[in-house]
Image (spheres, rainbow, N blue to C red):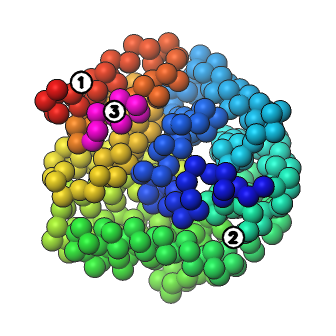
Amino acid sequence: MNLVANGPEDASTWHKVRIPINPARAYLPIAIGNPALLHVTLLHAAMNSPFLRDPKFQTALNYHKWKSIEAVNESIRKSTFDTFTIATVALLALLESADGSEIACRAHMTGLRALATHVGELDIDTLNPLLRQTIGWIDVAGAMTLQSPLLFTNTSDFIWNDVSFQTKMMVQVKHIVAKLYLITGSRALSESSGNIFQHLKWLSNGISRIPTSDVAGLEKLDFHTRLDHIERQCIELRNRALESANGNVDLIIAFSNASLIYICLIVRGYQRRLGMFEVLSQRTRNAIESMDWLMVDDTIPEMLLWITMVTSLALGEGAQKRWFSKSVKSVGGSMRLSTATEIAEKVKSFLWVENFVSREGLWQDGVDGCIEMEGI
């Protein structure tokens, strides 16, 4: 089975599906179009949220887990499992490792190995590039979080020592950076991004080699100190970009803050950075509202609306009322009404928890804002 052929888009598109680098056009239709992947995506959006730590919300958490696993089992039972199925199992494993459940994480990883074996192991010719990288990173992340051995023992080799794959990954990073460079005229952005993503790559893989001389002693520091270093690098990137930008400064702010938000969510852990997370979210919303949409590529509104949805889930009730409806209006007004409505309806249909029901009006506010701005 060639998973590249079974994906919704061609192999080159899968290379672009990289959160936090570019969660725009390629990822969004996949996430909202497949039930199993949507459930597990919502789990990731909310897994560190304080209000889901409350026992009364465990029913909702377990519901999404159950629906994800049920969809996977149904695919396997019908022998129709594909890229979506394997991606869902991989993300479930990551969810459990982030939650500290080693038994559940290993169970999902074992199932993942069985699925991978069925399609011909994690071979570069049979497994699509995004999935290869995702599985490798999840295995490494689980090993670091749970202090357990790698399940895919050759993970580091087939992910990072494969020069062709590593080159493709960096080409995609440079492509995104080049696009920003064209919009902003910021040479500092293109110079800094390479170092930052190398630091992230090194940290996630646990490689002992240091890619740049300025972090020669980084391997001696504890885990959170390394993450602090990366956060400082990201902030420095934003500041340097602003200093040299002669284009749309608000666009730079939105992109850099969005990337930093995702790093905080995925790498750092939301509970350690609540204050910083809220500040960055506010800055991103301000950038969205002041952006000159005539200068912006049409994929950017979709990406920012996706960030809005994830951020609002993670921040919880209080922040939603201050933040969410305005952001949906701001972003939704710059994109096709059908797209904004589709996203709103897809997500709303899964937010069935009692506390969310009263907030459905927030989605409607966003859709109404789209209608108002389009003059319908």
Where disc 2 sits, the SS reads: helix
What secondary structure is the magenta-colored segment mainly?
helix
The residue indicated by pointer 2 is 159
Q: Earlier in the sequence, mark 1 or mark 3?
A: 3
Which residues make up the magenta segment? 335-343
Quarter of the image where one finds residue 70: top right
Q: Residues within 10 Å of mark 3 (few under 14, many from 20)?
A: few
Q: Earlier in the sequence, mark 2 or mark 3?
A: 2
The residue indicated by pointer 3 is 338
Image location (x, y in percent) of residue 197: 49, 70
Type of amino acid under label 2: Ile
Q: Residues within 10 Å of mark 2 (few under 14, many from 20)?
A: many
Q: Residues within 10 Å of mark 1 (few under 14, many from 20)?
A: many
Taking depth in this image into account, of 181 and 77 the one nearest to the observer is 77
Quarter of the image where one finds residue 296: bottom left
Is residue 32 a member of the stretch shown in magenta? no
Residue lying at 60% horizontally and 76% vertically, measured from the top left: 166
Where disc 3 sits, the SS reads: helix
Image location (x, y in percent) of residue 265: 50, 48
Type of amino acid under label 3: Ser
* Residue 212 seen from this side: yes
Q: CA distance from mark 1 to mark 2?
A: 45 Å
Judged by depth in the image, the label closer to the viewer, 2 or 3, is 3
Type of amino acid under label 1: Asp
Is residue 337 a member of the stretch shown in magenta? yes
The residue indicated by pointer 1 is 368
